[in-house]
Image: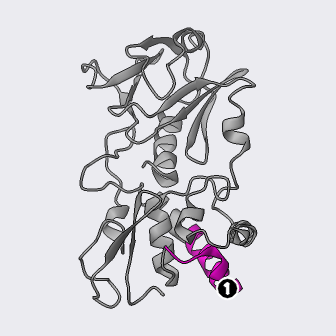
Amino acid sequence: MPELPEVETVRRALVQHLSGRKLDAVRVHNRHLRLPVNSRALRELAGLFLETVNRRGKYLLFCFPQRTLLCHLGMSGRFFLAFSRESLPAHTHVVFHFASGVRLFYVDPRRFGLLLVMDGENQALLSGLGPEPSDAEVVERQLLGAKKRKNSPVRNVLLDQRVIAGMGNIYANEALFAVGIRPQTPMGQLSQKQISALALAIVQVIQRAVEAGGTTLRDGSFTNALGAPGYFAVDLAVYGREGQACPRCATAIRRLVLAGRSAYFCPSCQR
């Protein structure tokens, strides 16, 4: 968390309010993230115009002339747009000051995020990513190729960014529920028909979540760059609903742990 729909939601707000704007200054308040912030590299962006903000998987790409700032939000990273002189939020690491008067705060309580000015060394962060989950035929080919991982639980394969870029635990669980496959099912046991259905479900779930502005859970851990929550939580069928009634058959949703992360499923609807 955040996953592709949340990152895309943030990107859209940033594009709307910052594209074409001149970056006046960068202030680093706390260098301690997953990798220490390179204060000098960030300050060298001052004076440049932000052309646009792109996304690749769960990464945001701030595109300046001949330079790109790469960001990964980690577990708790957030961007906040400030249009007035309000004080810095708690856990603010970096503030970007734009000539228009808008400020962009990067806030990260758990400090697992990344802010890197791209160079040859960290290009590998993007080169190893799989395709985006936007075309069901492409996703299907990726899943068919992953069948060689015969004993790997399908949920774990879906979280592998080398297979599908941007997929996360929430949407993997929801897509598996949509097609009636248990998250612990080994990849080698999936049929061609199941893989085709799963590929389509992944694309559809992601699209619906993007349209809803992502998912904000009860902990409020995600808001967009304007401070608004995402509304896909109301559509969640299984994720985070252990013990609650399945929306299809009313059987209690179960939770299990796979590779250290919770997976949710309906024992009646998913086989």
In the picture provided, is 128 more to the left or to the right than 247? right
> Could you say which quadrant of the image residue 38 lies in?
top right
Give the residue at the far front of this rendering.
Answer: 151
The kind of secondary structure element at disc 1 is: loop
Colour treatment of the image: one colour
Give the x, y percent position of residue 174.
Answer: 45, 71
Foreground residue, 148 or 208?
A: 148
Indicate whether residue 218 is drawn in magenta: no
Is 178 placed above or below 85 here? below
Q: Position of residue 233 (x, y in %)?
A: 33, 63
Above or below, 30 against 4 in this view is above
Q: Residue at x 30, y 22 (%)?
A: 84
What secondary structure prevails in the magenta region? Answer: helix
Q: Is residue 165 left or right of residue 13?
A: right
**Residue 189 falls within the magenta-colored stretch:** yes
Span colored in magenta: 184-203
In the foreground, 28 or 182: 182
Residue 71 visible, this angle = yes
Where does the image place residue 158, in percent across and percent down from the top left?
58, 63
Residue 252 image point, x, y percent = 27, 83
Residue at x 48% of width, y 51% of height: 3
Please tell me how crowded label 1 is: few (under 14), some (14-19), or many (20+) other residues with Cα within 10 Å: few
Left or right: where 181 falls relative to 261:
right
**What residue lies at 49% left-to-right and 73% top-to-bottom?**
183
61 to 58, vertically: above or below = above
Q: Amino acid at mark 1?
A: Ser
Vertical position of residue 168 compared to residue 172: above or below: above
Residue in the image at 36% along x and 67% along y:
239
The image shows a total of numbered marks equal to 1
Residue for badge 1: 191
The reply to whether residue 208 is visible in this rendering is no
